[in-house]
Image: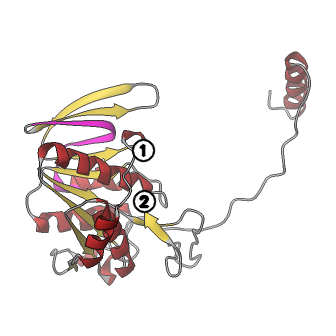
Amino acid sequence: MNIIVCIKQVPDTTEVRIDPSTGTLVREGVPSIINPFDENAIEAALQLVEAHGGCVTILTMGPPQAEQALRDALAMGADRAVLICDRAFAGSDTLATSYTLAQAIRSLGDFDLILCGKQAFDGDTAQVGPGLAEQLGLPQVTYAINIEVDGKKVRVKRLLDDRFEVVETRLPALLTVVKQINDPRHAGLRGVMKARKAEIPVLTAGDIEADITRCGLNGSPTNVVRVFSPQRHGQGEKLEGEPDEVARQLFEKLHTAQIV
């Protein structure tokens, strides 16, 4: 089976900076990693191909430096990788990103399954996966914690807030996976050496026949109005004593503050 995994290179979570004038992430000079949820999607794809045969293609949209994320995925064991890179894609929100990824996937040819991490660490919207499924007209199942492929069907166990849910749908389909689905493998030396030598094609807006008015800032109906750091609150008060006494003190403080 042919599986496409959509990944995103994100800033290291301890190094996130935002340009206050544009509201976009500052990536220059900032350490970057594969979005952690996407590593789980890569691992899920590799396990499915090991069980059923096929090919794993890694796809990402980003600046030239995103090529490193693709090489990291190849080092894990993916078969090929494709970078979507064009100045026209800069500033894309989730809608424009979904459209661009869909155009790229159409240009790649047939596939059986698309896997995505449930969300990206830098945006936390969890919208690109479902948006991509909508753009491609695919059935989608989110929050997958287990995936079983049977012929032209896929059975997915979903992780919900208070229970599990099992859903079956036809292929091709798009799934988003949660962190608990697996433990991503570490790249071995042979994989790293292979990834270094791999040729990674770069697709531009023209290559994927993208409508420029639907890409980048032009195709993004959302915009950032203001960016700021939350104000720090003072340290809370610690209550000590027996449980009944602590409960009484807490009630008195909440009552004084007119919260209860």
Furthest residue in direction top, as rendered: 244
On screen, residue 172 versus residue 63, left or right, reads left
* Location of residue 240 in the rendering, given as x and y in whole percent from the top left corner: 91, 29
Residue 241 vs 141, above or below: the answer is above
Q: Residue at x 53, y 81 (%)?
A: 29
User: How crowded is the residue under tag 2: few (<14 C-alpha within 10 Å), some, or many (20+)?
Assistant: many
| In magenta segment, residue 210 | no
**Residue interval drawn in magenta:** 135-150
Q: Residue at x 37, y 61 (%)?
A: 94
Q: Which amino acid type is shown beneath numbered disc 1?
A: Lys
* Location of residue 171 in the rendering, given as x and y in whole percent from the top left corner: 12, 43
* Location of residue 228 in the rendering, given as x and y in whole percent from the top left corner: 65, 66
Residue marked by disc 1 = 179
Residue marked by disc 2 = 35
On screen, residue 191 versus residue 29, left or right, reads left
User: How crowded is the residue under tag 1: few (<14 C-alpha within 10 Å), some, or many (20+)?
Assistant: some
Q: Quadrant of residue 221?
A: bottom left
Residue 149 vs 47, above or below: the answer is above
| In magenta segment, residue 143 | yes
Task: Give the CA separation, mark 1 to mark 2.
Answer: 11 Å
Residue 96 in view (yes/no):
no
User: Judging from the image, what secondary structure is the residue with disc 2 in?
Assistant: loop
